[in-house]
Image (cartoon, grey):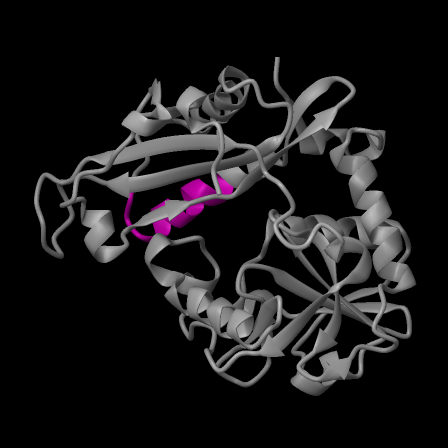
Amino acid sequence: MFTNTENKLIWTNGKFQKWNDSNVHILSHTLHYGTGVFEGVRAYKTKSGPAIFRLEDHTERLFNAASKIGIRIPYTKSELNEAQLETLKINKLSEGYLRPIVYLGNEGLGLRAKHLSVNVAIAAWEWPSYMDPNAKMNGISVVKSSHRQYDNPLHSGNKIIGTYFSNTMALHEALDKGADEAIMMDKNGFISEGSGENIFLIKNDIIFTPTTKHCLNGITRQSVIQLARNSNYDVEEKNLGYEDLRNADEAFFTGTAVEITPITKIDDHKIKNGKRGKVTKKLQEKFNKIICGDDKTYEDWLSLVK
């Protein structure tokens, strides 16, 4: 739930407006057809002040996704990077979550969206633990979803607004079954991802993760692959089946919201001993140092608010 919204401001088309005054017309093309893109971005408290994690990479992905569905964002990448930093600053947040979103206007309705306005907004707010606060230590439970990940790589590989209904249904199905998250399969029956997270598993100290043919190439995913390899772990991207996860020594999710969160149970089966594994713990510790600005090797991943 959002809190303290009466004092928050949202950047919209170059200007700040009060949180409660922000609105979208009922005939916005994006509301009806889902034609738009978004990003999920995290900011962290560091000794040098608030810093946004991999800001330029998130903005680059926003522009790439927009171009793939024919939307030309009316701002430069630099302008939106600065707008995100300013949104964090004006809301006096030392850490939190940012949501840039690109959506089409209400000048007309129908599938023809060639001459509609392109709008951009950025909101920021406090971000408590996405799951149980103890999940990063104790792990979470997942279930195999009956909802399949998208067949079209355009949908699964980009953060396009209208393509997330299957993810929502998969998560709701998992919650209804008493689990914390879902595991979605691709059209070939291989593991794709969670409802909003990438997945990794570990066997004999080798780290495995699905290819990006049918899942988002998450920025946290990319970060974990890089820091794992730099820590002398072998990382293999390959097709993974349900039994690979059941028989893994360890497993974890990655994502902007969950960061690195262990998976300790799938359906009615414990993964190994049902506890967070040693490799997962080491990667968590490394990642935490990076996002807090305590690891100078990766300091270019942080954009400080000035």
Q: Can residue 190 be seen in this snapshot? A: yes
The answer to whether residue 243 is magenta is: no
- Residue at x 76% of width, y 54% of height: 136
Image-based side of 93 in relation to 246, left or right:
left
Position of 180 relative to 17 (above/below): below
190 or 63, which is in the foreground?
A: 190
- Residue at x 44% of width, y 53% of height: 159
Count the labels in the image.
0
Position of 80 relative to 263 (above/below): above
Q: From which residue to which does the magenta span run?
A: 60-71
Quadrant of the drawing holding the C terminus: top right
- Residue at x 87% of width, y 55% of height: 281
Where's residue 150, x and y in %?
43, 72
The answer to whether residue 63 is magenta is: yes
Image-based side of 37 in relation to 56, left or right:
left
Residue 106 falls in image quadrant: top left
Residue 123 falls in image quadrant: top left
Residue 212 falls in image quadrant: bottom right
Where's residue 206, x and y in %?
86, 69
- Residue at x 79% of width, y 41% of height: 288
294 or 80, which is in the foreground?
A: 294
Residue lying farthest to the top in this orientation: 306
4 or 196, which is in the foreground?
A: 4
Q: Can residue 225 be seen in this snapshot? A: no
Image-based side of 154 in relation to 36, left or right:
right
Where's residue 62, x and y in %?
44, 42
How would you classify the magenta stretch by its main secondary structure? Answer: helix
Image-based side of 45 in relation to 89, left or right:
right
Position of 62 relative to 12 (above/below): below
Position of 189 relative to 233 (above/below): below
Where's residue 132, x and y in %?
68, 54
